[in-house]
Image: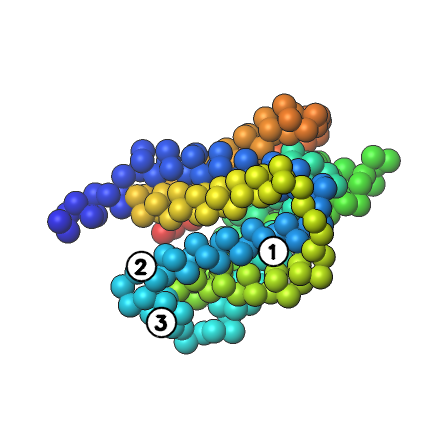
Amino acid sequence: MRQEAVAQRNNVPAGIALMIAATIVFALQDGISRHLAGTYNTWMVVMIRYWFFAAFVIALAARSPGGLRAAARTTQPFVQAFRGVLLAAEIGVAVYGFTLLGLIDSLAVFISYPLLVAALSGPVLGEAVGWRRWAAIGVGFVGVLIILRPGSGVFNPAAIIPLISAFMFALYGLLTRYVARRDTTATSFFWTGTTGAVVMTAIGIFFWEPMRAADWGWMALLCVSGAFGHWLLIKCYEMAEASAVQPFAYFHLVWASILGLAVFGETLRTNVVLGAALVIAAGLFTLWRERRQG
């Protein structure tokens, strides 16, 4: 049984399939979020989504060994709570960016977050970042500048929003690494869902507005897809090492671009394609270097 568990954790083809499936679900989730946040207040949409997310993580914790008490037990509650609040705020910022810029432009900038993780891993976690990875980070941010086109007559200041979102998500990822030194994945997942739901309720309840019956259906699908996407990621990382499957997370941009073009009538500009290609290439290089050093 022990050998079977190890083999399952290193089943890279299954892990890749689960990661690609997760990116499809998350792209669908982004499209629904854009639709709903374009009609209703962003914070209300995120709040309802978090209610379902919190119920999902509580249900998982209740079924795990030790129950809710074991899942909630931590020696670093303030860091865990800050992580949950940070992710909730990041989702709100990201969804707001979708309504202003669309899926393609927003995600083309957001996919720079692995480079931000690499850049911030030194000051936040004390990890060494060599010159090769710093060079890749520089190339990636040249790609971001190509996408944003600062200084040109077509620069949209709102394009900074997905960059802020990427920074917040990178910091969340680094704090997740930090708390993992003493807490289990189940504990981090529990705190992420519950603290996020509390904070979003405190904010979103003031922006409540009536929702049409048809849009409640979309909201239900958004909630289910969010929980299902997280479940797929959990299973993905159980199947294979993160460094082996993480490059396939860039398929998220592919699916979201198809959705943006086909459903929302967005355009795929040349500078976005070139810039995103540089960002992805730099991100894949940093992942490769991290895997080699690991």
In the shown orientation, is residue 42 left or right of residue 154?
A: left
Numbered disc 2: secondary structure: helix
C-alpha span from label 3 to label 1:
25 Å
Residue on which disc 3 sits: 69
* In the displayed structure image, the side of residue 47 where residue 233 appears, left or right: left
The image's mark for residue 63 is: 2
Q: Is residue 214 visible?
A: yes
Q: Quadrant of residue 36?
A: top right
Three-letter code, disc 2:
Arg
List x then y, in percent, for residue 208: 69, 55
Residue 173 x %, y %: 50, 56
In the figure, residue 147 lies in which quadrant?
Answer: top right
| Pointer 3 local density, CA inside 10 Å: few below 14, some 14–19, many at least 20 | few
Dot placed on the residue nearer the N-terminal end, 2 or 1 = 1
Q: Which mark is residue 287?
A: none
Residue sitting at x 72%, y 41%: 38
| Residue 64 versus residue 101 in the image, above or below | below
CA–CA distance between discs 2 and 3? 11 Å
Any part of residue 285 in sight: no
- The residue that label 1 is drawn on is 47
Q: Earlier in the sequence, mark 3 or mark 1?
A: 1
